[in-house]
């Protein structure tokens, strides 16, 4: 008799690690090509270098740790593309390499590889690069120019609108510019309209949760409306805070990481809300512009606590509901 | 021949217990903040090592001499106080290494008097002979210093491209995070993993060598019958 022997759990689900990660890759590819339109071929090389390095590192780690090398596992590719998308267009290749190596060698492989990492590898890699080379990480250029492969003195370096906001200034960007990402920023995280379209695709494919992104954006919007600079409309302040940096990108791609988010819906909402609050706290009180990444990392550490809280809360809620039903 | 090598290795491990085997930092994870935060460079590591030699080794030796005569609740108080008193001469010695180092490292010098390594060692030497106590204390100190020096050298080299303040790597990109506590903890994690890997490889080698012996003896036994 032929019988198939599989390990538990016996779950049949259309979504697998491969489908979720390939959806993420599909949702990242438009941003990758849009960056070529804005900055030329250099950013394509940065993206390809980052993605290939992450993949090679992941495979090498699996080989050295006697784990099965799964060529269908695209999580390292997603990590690499996200890292490159959150880097400035003028970034040196060694900074990208250090971020990728840190992401895979320190954050992913020692914890057990794909599906076992406590922290989001891309967020950890970016945080590492920010701590090491903070001056290089926030040097932006004017879009719609072909950057040379080697960045020299002929390229004029600019400050991003997030830095202006941090200093209490007003970026004065039009809505069209904000939606199209036509302002100095990172390689691929400023194209709000495209990111929004990708978010819809990810939600339709069940690779992202709408309530998670929304619960993250609500505290950001509320705090930026309350704390708006003098002479700026609250709506304009919300738009500046949400779309003039990498915050919206982080809320779509990093926050919806299936490995590091909590498992229950209520826990996810709490997680997103807390991450939003922490992002704004870091934005007002930290020296770095990339506050969303640090907030996500902090929340990754607390993710199991949210699940535990939910497990404690749910039976109580259920009991209360049953009691209410009996009284009626 | 393999078995001879294994025996030699085991003998070496027994002799260097606390340095290679059961290293207080890498294997037991004791006094990690003390070893990581001041060891951002070789000068800081040397200062902490000298201060530890003056404070830690005599205190452990004293605890071995007194033994169980002091109750546990008193031991926990008395030996850190003794270590604190020894910190006064340690300060003058450390200032010879670098005049500003005591102020630079600050509170971490005080941690030499109250840390998990001291408490562990004090309790470990309660029923030992004085010579054994002294060698135990020296081995623990040497094991901690060896790893702290290695870590300090790597961190200084990565962050500044220098060793003991002398620039060695001029044109290579620097890694400033190596001098932060974050970099120290990550480096320690990798060193601990490397240590475990080496030990596991040697263990598998010795198991292979050991598995040859009973088989051959059985064969010999069967041949005898």
Image (cartoon, rainbow, N blue to C red):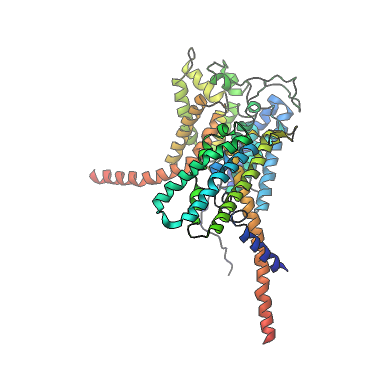
B173 sits to left or right of B13: right
Residue at 53% in and 47% down? B56
How many labels, in total? Answer: 0
Tell me where residue B209 appears, x and y as whole percent: 68, 68
Tell me where residue A110 appears, x and y as whole percent: 60, 48
**Which of A127 and B3 lies nearest the eye of the viewer?**
B3
Quarter that holds the C terminus of chain B:
bottom right
**Which of A182 and A135 lies nearest the eye of the viewer?**
A135
Quarter that holds the N terminus of chain B:
bottom right
**Which of B180 and A243 lies nearest the eye of the viewer?**
B180
**Which of A231 and A182 lies nearest the eye of the viewer?**
A231
Tell me where residue A86 appears, x and y as whole percent: 62, 31
Q: Is residue A18 visible?
A: no
Residue at 75% in and 19% down? A154
Q: Measured along the vertical axis of the image, is residue A194 above or below residue A15?
A: above
B158 sits to left or right of A215: right
Q: Residue furthest bottom?
A: B225
Q: Quadrant of residue A97?
A: top right
Q: Quadrant of residue A32?
A: top right
Q: Measured along the vertical axis of the image, is residue A96 above or below residue B209?
A: above
Residue at 33% in and 45% down? A316
Q: Quadrant of residue B211?
A: bottom right
Residue at 67% in and 84% down? B222
Q: Is residue A60 visible?
A: yes
Q: Measured along the vertical axis of the image, is residue B201 above or below residue B220?
A: above
Tell me where residue B141 appears, x and y as whole percent: 58, 49
């Amino acid at each position: 008799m032929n019988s198939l022997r599989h390990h538990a759990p016996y779950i049949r689900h259309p979504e697998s690690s491969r489908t979720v990660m390939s959806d993420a890759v599909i949702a990242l590819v438009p941003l990758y090509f849009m960056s070529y339109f804005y900055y030329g071929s250099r950013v394509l090389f940065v993206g390809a270098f980052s993605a290939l390095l992450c993949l090679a590192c992941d495979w090498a780690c699996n080989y050295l740790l006697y784990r099965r090398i799964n060529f269908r596992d695209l999580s390292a590719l997603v990590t690499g593309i996200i890292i490159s998308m959150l880097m400035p267009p003028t970034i040196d290749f060694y900074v990208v390499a250090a971020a990728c190596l840190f992401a895979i060698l320190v954050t992913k492989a020692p914890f057990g590889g794909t599906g076992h990492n406590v922290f989001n590898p891309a967020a950890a890699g970016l945080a590492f690069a920010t701590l090491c080379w903070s001056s290089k990480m926030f040097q932006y250029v004017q879009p719609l120019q072909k950057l040379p492969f080697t960045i020299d003195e002929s390229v004029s370096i600019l400050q991003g609108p997030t830095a202006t906001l941090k200093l209490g200034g007003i970026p004065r960007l039009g809505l069209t510019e904000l939606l199209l990402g036509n302002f100095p920023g990172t390689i691929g995280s400023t194209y709000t309209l495209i990111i929004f379209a990708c978010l819809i695709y990810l939600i339709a494919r069940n690779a992202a949760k709408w309530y998670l992104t929304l619960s993250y954006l609500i505290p950001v919007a509320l705090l930026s409306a309350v704390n708006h600079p003098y002479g700026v409309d609250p709506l304009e302040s919300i738009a500046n805070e949400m779309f003039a940096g990498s915050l919206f990108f982080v809320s779509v791609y990093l926050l919806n990481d299936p490995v590091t988010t909590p498992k229950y819906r209520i826990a996810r909402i709490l997680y997103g809300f807390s991450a939003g609050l922490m992002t704004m706290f870091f934005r007002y009180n930290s020296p770095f512009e990339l506050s969303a990444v640090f907030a996500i990392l902090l929340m990754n550490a607390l993710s199991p606590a949210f699940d535990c809280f939910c497990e404690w809360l749910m039976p109580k809620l259920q009991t209360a509901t049953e009691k209410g039903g009996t009284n009626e | 021949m393999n078995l001879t090598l294994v025996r030699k290795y085991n003998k070496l491990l027994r002799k260097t217990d606390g340095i290679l085997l059961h290293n207080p930092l890498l294997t037991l994870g004791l006094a990690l903040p003390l070893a990581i935060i001041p060891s951002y460079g070789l000068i800081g590591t040397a200062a902490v090592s000298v201060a530890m030699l003056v404070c830690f080794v005599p205190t452990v030796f004293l605890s071995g001499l007194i033994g169980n005569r002091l109750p546990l609740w008193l031991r926990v108080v008395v030996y850190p106080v003794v270590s604190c008193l020894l910190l006064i001469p340690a300060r003058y010695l450390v200032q010879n290494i670098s005049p500003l180092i005591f102020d630079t490292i600050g509170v971490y010098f005080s941690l030499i008097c109250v840390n998990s390594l001291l408490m562990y060692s004090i309790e470990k030497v309660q029923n030992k002979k004085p010579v054994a106590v002294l060698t135990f204390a020296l081995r623990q100190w040497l094991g901690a210093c060896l790893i702290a020096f290695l870590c300090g050298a790597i961190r200084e080299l990565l962050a500044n491209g220098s060793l003991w303040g002398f620039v060695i790597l001029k044109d290579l990109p620097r890694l400033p995070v190596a001098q932060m506590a974050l970099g120290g903890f990550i480096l320690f994690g990798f060193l601990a993993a490397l240590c475990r890997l080496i030990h596991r490889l040697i263990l598998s080698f010795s198991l292979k060598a050991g598995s040859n012996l009973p088989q051959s003896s059985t064969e010999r036994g069967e041949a005898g019958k």
